[in-house]
Each structure stands twice: as C-alpha cells, then as structure tokens.
Image (cartoon, rainbow, N blue to C red):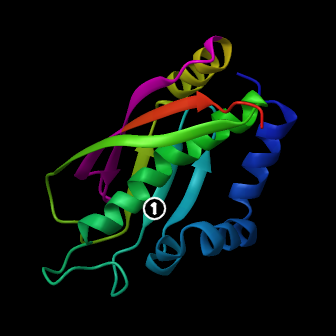
Amino acid sequence: MTLSPAGNAFVRRVTHPFLFRFWLLLKLPSALFAGVSLKQIGTNGCDTTVPFGWRSQNPFQSTYFATQAMAAELSTGALVLLATTDAGVPFSTLIVEMRATFGKKATATTTFSCVSGADIFAAVAQARSSGEARVIVVETVGRLPDGAEVSRFWFTWSVKTRSAR
C-alpha cells in the first residue's frame, strides 16, 4: 500500500527522534517520562518499546502494567493516526474497550508489535466512504528481547469521520 503525502509526512515526523519526543511531551508526557519509544511504523504494523527501569517498574521488580499499556496503546494508536491522517479528512478516534493478559514478568525492555495495519486502514476507508463509525479490535503483543511473551493487549478502536464545522 502506498501512503499519501500526508501519510508519508506523518511517518517522517513520528520516526524523527526529536520530533517524536516533542510530540510525546505535548500529548503523552507520562509516556515520555517512562521512556516509551516508537521503533518502526508502516502500513502493515508498528513496534514500540518500553525500558525496564526505575521510571517504569512496580514494587514487584517488573514493568508496571500501566506502563506496558501505554506502550501497547501507542503501537496501535500510531497506526490509527497514520491511517486517519492518510485518509485526508478529519476523523474522531476513541478507544472503547481494552483487554489484556499477562503471562510473564517484564524484567527487560519490552517491545510491543501490532501487525494489524491493513485491518486498520480498511476500517478507516470504510468509515470514510460510509460516513458511519467503524469499530475494530486490534491486538498487540509485548515480548522480551529473548522472544518471551510478556503481555497481550486488545484495543477496540472506534473511528468516524468528523462533520464539517
């Protein structure tokens, strides 16, 4: 899939280290404090990371579940932002549900991978053409550097074109 100029500009902005950190400072300061970063984004998927350390850990010597949720949400939310920006019309987006499972303590940098880009782009295209809200469930998986699965999140996103003001 080929991105529009607006979509390509979005990718350049969020993959530029300084611009991304500035955006986090303005929009998600707690994610900036925790060290959440975006490693890659494209039409097929997105990877984010969160380090294990004093800014992200809980009293049980693992990454706090809320910090994992921030990185997990960003791996899906960045794709939603990319798809809506690429569509070229204003959209309203909202998480309407979140579920998670935790299988192992996160004791090192955790990478969250979402590979639902094509599904997100399709839902945004349907919402744009119909003018009605579309709901999509998007999965992201957190893994340690050795490949062990730490957590799995499902975010239910609602996307709808905004009416002209």
The image quadrant that residue 18 belongs to is bottom right
Disc 1 is placed on an element classified as strand
Whole-percent x, y for residue 126 in the image: 59, 15
**Magenta stretch prevailing secondary structure:** strand
- Is 52 magenta? The answer is no
**10 Å crowding of disc 1: few (<14), some (14-19), many (20+):** many
> Residue at the location (31% across, 59% down)?
144
> Residue at the location (54% across, 65% down)?
37
Whole-percent x, y for residue 113 in the image: 43, 45
For label 1, the residue is 49
Q: Residue furthest right?
A: 5
Which residue is more in the foreground, 122 or 39? 122
Whole-percent x, y for residue 100 in the image: 22, 47
The image quadrant that residue 152 belongs to is top left
Q: Left of 4 or right of it: where is 33?
A: left
Which residue is more in the foreground, 158 or 104? 158
Whole-percent x, y for residue 98 in the image: 29, 44
Magenta segment range?
130-155
Q: Left of 116 or right of it: where is 82?
A: right
Q: From what the image shows, is residue 10 above or below residue 85?
A: below
Q: Residue furthest bottom?
A: 54
> Residue at the location (74% across, 62% down)?
16
The image quadrant that residue 104 belongs to is bottom left
Q: Residue furthest top?
A: 130
Q: From what the image shows, is residue 80 above or below residue 33?
A: above
Q: Left of 1 or right of it: where is 51?
A: left
Q: From what the image shows, is residue 61 above or below residue 119?
A: below
- Is 146 magenta? The answer is yes
Q: Amino acid at mark 1?
A: Thr
